[in-house]
Amino acid sequence: MGDAQSSAVVALAGWLAETQRIAARDPREPARQRPPPPPSGLMPQDCAAVGFEFYAKGSARYGADSPFHVNFSPDLQHQTMLFDGMKRGQGAWLWVDGQAVPVPADRYGNPATAILVRWLDGRFSQGLLADVESPARALALWAWVRETGLIAMRGEHSFTREYPVPPTGFKPTECNAVGFEFHDDRSAYDSLDAAGIGTVHVDFSPDAEHQAVLLKGSHDWWGALLCVDSEWVPVPREPDGNPMCDTTARWLDNRFVSVQVGGLWEHPLLDPRKNDSLGDIRGLLVWDTVTHARQLLLPEPTQAWTQPRLSARGDSWRIYPDKNAFEQDRPDRVLTGMPRSPT
């Protein structure tokens, strides 16, 4: 055993002991801290030297009944380390390349470690995250979709529940790696249930640096909740809390994003015969990613905005009532002196 490997083995053995010591403390103790991250740059032989048993390529457990589980990417450039103390009532912790990542919860709020291990064995160790910028962020995105879906599909009025925010700064490649489907290179979606009733839809800004996430849950949801760059944006709601926001977003540029909103039940041009849970007359919610300010742009009583679109021209914004008017450049409203994106 070389000096470098010997040093890694000693560090790993010490970390395993320290993590188990911390985990053995009562989780209710205020002083109980999360263990430090595992040593970086580990190799399979380092793990084998301290007692990890490899049952598949890139996948090992620390003894038959141990709470530790390690996964390596095929190129050995990335690793995950999971502490699964659920059987002992000690909780669960996960690190990806030394970065702490939340463990997804099951429908009862407990860490879903068995599902996580299967996912790591079947995707991480099989190289399906090889092309992503950050495996840690990709895994955090997968965990968020799973946990959020369990909340959103949990019976009636689940739109009133509190939802965690998605990880910051995730990219299209990371969506692809964890199973999202794509409408185009900047618009992706995933189902929250087998029937496809619940959905999460992501629209990326032109530079792919910003993400607008639209979350829609079970049958009684009329619209979606909106999260931009890991910040929940207030959307119009019905008295019972049902969101009146559409399920897709449209970026004006790399700063502003807009989403259609409904619920304009008193508008004189609303057609009640239309089978549309948000109503066929729409407004626009515009979010500024720089100032974190929200604007609601609503049609006048004589304006029938059925598919409103927003475009920028110089320092003005032009609002079109529908796709046809947009293609013919016939705006219904022009707002001047509007802020621009940084160049």
Image: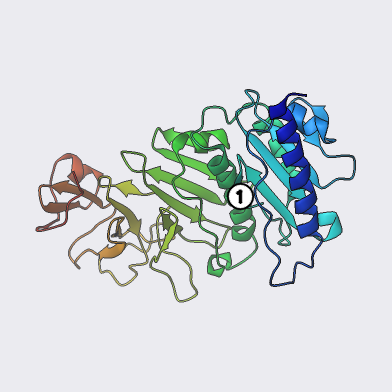
At x 29%, y 64%, the residue is 293
Q: In this image, 36 relative to 275: left or right?
A: right
Furthest toward the front, the residue is 3
Furthest toward the bottom, the residue is 239
Residue picked out by circle 1: 100
At x 69%, y 37%, the residue is 120
Q: Measured from the top left, where is residue 17 in percent x and y?
A: 80, 49
Q: Measured from the top left, where is residue 266 in percent x and y?
A: 31, 72
Q: In this image, 305 relative to 235: left or right?
A: left
* Colour scheme in use: rainbow
Q: Quadrant of the C terminus?
A: top left
In the foreground, 241 or 121? 121
Binning the other alpha carbons within 10 Å of mark 1 as few (below 14), some (14 to 19) or many (20 upward) gives: some
Name the element at disc 1.
strand
Q: Measured from the top left, where is residue 110 in percent x and y?
A: 74, 59
Query: How many numbered markers are drawn?
Result: 1
At x 45%, y 76%, the residue is 239
In the foreground, 238 or 276? 238
**Where, by quadrant of the figure, is residue 27 drawn?**
bottom right
**Where, by quadrant of the figure, is residue 95 drawn?**
top right
